[in-house]
Image (cartoon, rainbow, N blue to C red):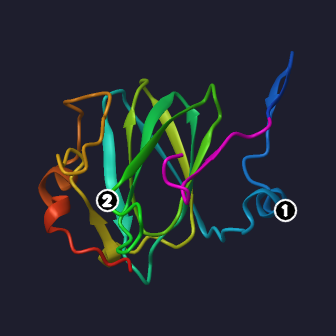
């Protein structure tokens, strides 16, 4: 990944004539490969249709969330934007295609906005969070902000009224992450 703190995880998948098996999270293996173990307290799942864009969302401290995300069915273009003031990658973004087929996962640490564009109909997206949802701490950055220059594969996605009306432009955003 272009941002070192965002980790693309490619699990070892065991396939045979019956199907497949893989460990979507293993604490000991994570510590061995990444040098730390995230604490997850909430799992979420969403189903979205092709062309839906969710994001770019974050939760501010003290309820900031790290996420481990993956796709159970379908495919998404997943994006993380660094919101950490003072970070050498502040305002930069990275992306990966996650799908049921490739079984990739993305670890997004605290201090990042996160969003995804659904590439296949009825995609199911799953994510582990390091803190519980806290409505008063949620925020959003405009998904199509020209200052960020995110290269979304869809130029006219379906977005929620909440994201369209309440997301901040990046240049007027005051990051709570230091």
Nearer-the-camera pick, 10 or 65: 10
Residue 139, how many percent across, how many down?
A: 28, 67
Q: Residues within 10 Å of mark 2 (few under 14, many from 20)?
A: some
Image side of residue 156 versus residue 135, left or right? left
104 to 121, vertically: above or below: below
Whether residue 4 appears in magenta in the rendering, the answer is yes
Residue 28 badge: 1
Mark 2 secondary-structure assignment: loop
Question: Magenta segment, which residues?
Answer: 1-12
Q: Residue furthest front?
A: 88
Q: Where does residue 163 sit, x and y in percent of width and height?
A: 21, 53
Residue with the most extreme top position: 17
Q: Image height check: is 75 above or below 33?
A: above
Q: Is residue 156 left or right of residue 78?
A: left
**Label 1 crowding class (10 Å Cα cut-off): few <14, some 14-19, many 20+?**
few
Residue 133 appears in the rendering: yes
Q: Nearer the viewer, residue 43 or 35?
A: 35
Residue at 12 percent across and 55 percent down: it is 165
- Residue 36 falls in image quadrant: bottom right
- Taking the magenta stretch, the answer to whether it contains residue 11 is yes
* Left or right: 105 as drawn, with respect to 13: left
Q: Name the residue: 54% across, 46% down.
A: 1
Q: Please indicate whether residue 66 sits to the left or right of residue 34 in the image.
A: left
- Estimate the x, y position of residue 10 in percent, counting from the top left: 69, 39
Tell me which label, 2 or 1, sits earlier in the chain.
Answer: 1
Instruction: Name the residue located 32 percent from the left edge and 70 percent from the top edge.
Output: 138
Residue 168 appears in the figure: no
- C-alpha span from label 2 to label 1: 32 Å
* Residue 76 lies in quadrant: top left
Residue identifier under label 2: 91
């Amino acid at each position: 990944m272009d941002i070192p703190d965002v980790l693309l995880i490619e699990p070892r998948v065991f396939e045979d004539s019956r199907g497949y098996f893989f460990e979507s999270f293993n604490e000991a293996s994570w510590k061995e490969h990444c040098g730390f173990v995230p604490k997850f307290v909430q799992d979420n799942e969403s189903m979205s249709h092709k062309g839906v864009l969710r994001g770019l969302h974050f939760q501010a401290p003290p309820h900031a969330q790290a996420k481990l995300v993956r796709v159970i069915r379908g495919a998404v273009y997943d994006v993380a934007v660094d919101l950490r003031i003072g970070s050498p990658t502040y305002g930069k973004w990275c992306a990966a295609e996650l799908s049921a087929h490739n079984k990739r996962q993305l670890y997004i640490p605290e201090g990042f906005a996160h969003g995804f564009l659904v590439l296949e109909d009825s995609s199911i997206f799953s994510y582990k969070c390091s803190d519980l949802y806290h409505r008063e701490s949620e925020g959003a950055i405009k998904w199509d902000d020209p200052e960020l220059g995110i290269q979304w594969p869809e130029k006219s996605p379906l977005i929620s009224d909440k994201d369209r009306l309440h997301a901040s432009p990046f240049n007027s955003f005051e990051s709570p992450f230091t």
